[in-house]
Amino acid sequence: MSDQTSTPAGSAVIVGGARGIGLAAVGLAASRVAAMTVLDLPEEAPQVGKAFPGARYQCADVLDPTSLEKGFALAAERGPVTSVFVPAGITLPAPLLEVRQEDAQRCLMINIMGAVNTIQAAAPHLAPDASIVLCASVAAYTGGGYIGGPVYGASKAAVISLTKGAARELAPRKVRVNCVAPGTTATGMIGDDPDVHAMFVERSLVGRLASPEDIAESVLYLWSPASSFMTGAVLDVNGGIRL
Ligand SMILES: NC(=O)c1ccc[n+]([C@@H]2O[C@H](COP(=O)([O-])OP(=O)(O)OC[C@H]3O[C@@H](n4cnc5c(N)ncnc54)[C@H](O)[C@@H]3O)[C@@H](O)[C@H]2O)c1
């Protein structure tokens, strides 16, 4: 794909791009990639077409490999897929000793197997030099916290490991795989309680929450040739919240 200064090229797919960080990446990509396909759970997502005129949208569940395969086949109609971002994920605030089996399994399945299924569905359609970006979290390092509990944190630590394994396995095809590890980001996932927001602002060295665009910019960097020597890496975008 191209950087901001050249003519947009390439075909991007964002899995989980109907809202939040994914939707911000759709919008920022509008001037930087030629074609966009967004996959997510809702039947329709009119905000996607507003963010990226001409973007294609298809309903898909990361737990349903067939729906992902259909989505990537749709994207490939516009040329080999050059850029993939997988923000699809759910949080799980429950404490470890209280978490219900079915909730833990769903969180682990969506956050880990969702990324596995997406990479498998994307693989036949990837261009040489394609860039895949997975989505971890600061919670991977902290064992979860307020927004996501220990099971969520473990799922995001697994995403970091998966990033490294996928980078190694896809390197012979010249495909790079990296992940972003966002800090607390102002999306629906963290809710709108001002006291909770204030607590995270206080912990951030930058003195604010991340905007979805803060995270999306790092994704577009990892898609771009500017990051061509990065693979298997974790890009921490957390305002220094752990320091
Ligand atoms: N918001 C934060 O503070 C924060 C911090 C660290 C990491 N993250 C991670 O960033 C990613 C994006 O989070 P967000 O804040 O934009 O949340 P969000 O809830 O706004 O967006 C998540 C998206 O994933 C989609 N999704 C969920 N389950 C899916 C499934 N089974 N199949 C397909 N799509 C599915 C949702 O429909 C939604 O569009 C997530 O992986 C999240 O864990 C968020």
Image (spheres, rainbow, N blue to C red):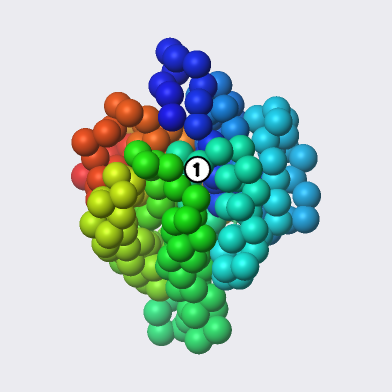
- The residue lying at 41 percent from left, 21 percent from top is 3
- As helix, strand or loop, the secondary structure at mark 1 comes to strand
- The residue lying at 32 percent from left, 28 percent from top is 225
> Within 10 angstroms of label 1, few (less than 14), some, or many (20 or more) residues?
many
Q: Position of residue 90 (x, y in %)?
A: 53, 62
Image height of 61 relative to 199, above or below: below
Residue 202 can be seen, yes or no:
no
Circle 1 residue: 81
- The residue lying at 43 percent from left, 24 percent from top is 2
Which quarter of the figure is the N terminus placed in?
A: top left
- The residue lying at 44 percent from left, 56 percent from top is 123
Report which quarter residue 131 is drawn in: top left
Report which quarter residue 150 is drawn in: bottom left
Residue 222 can be seen, yes or no:
yes
Using the image as rendered, state which of residue 33 and residue 103 is in the foreground: 33
Using the image as rendered, state which of residue 121 and residue 106 is in the foreground: 121
Q: Position of residue 233 (x, y in %)?
A: 25, 47
Tag 1: amino acid:
Val
In screen coordinates, is 26 left or right of 98?
right
Q: Position of residue 188 (x, y in %)?
A: 60, 49
CB of mark 1 near ligand 1 (< 8 Å): no
Q: Position of residue 32 (x, y in %)?
A: 50, 24
Using the image as rendered, state which of residue 203 and residue 241 is in the foreground: 241
In screen coordinates, is 30 left or right of 173?
right
Which quarter of the figure is the C terminus placed in?
A: top left
Image height of 172 relative to 161, above or below: above
In screen coordinates, is 100 left or right of 157?
right
> Number of labelled discs?
1
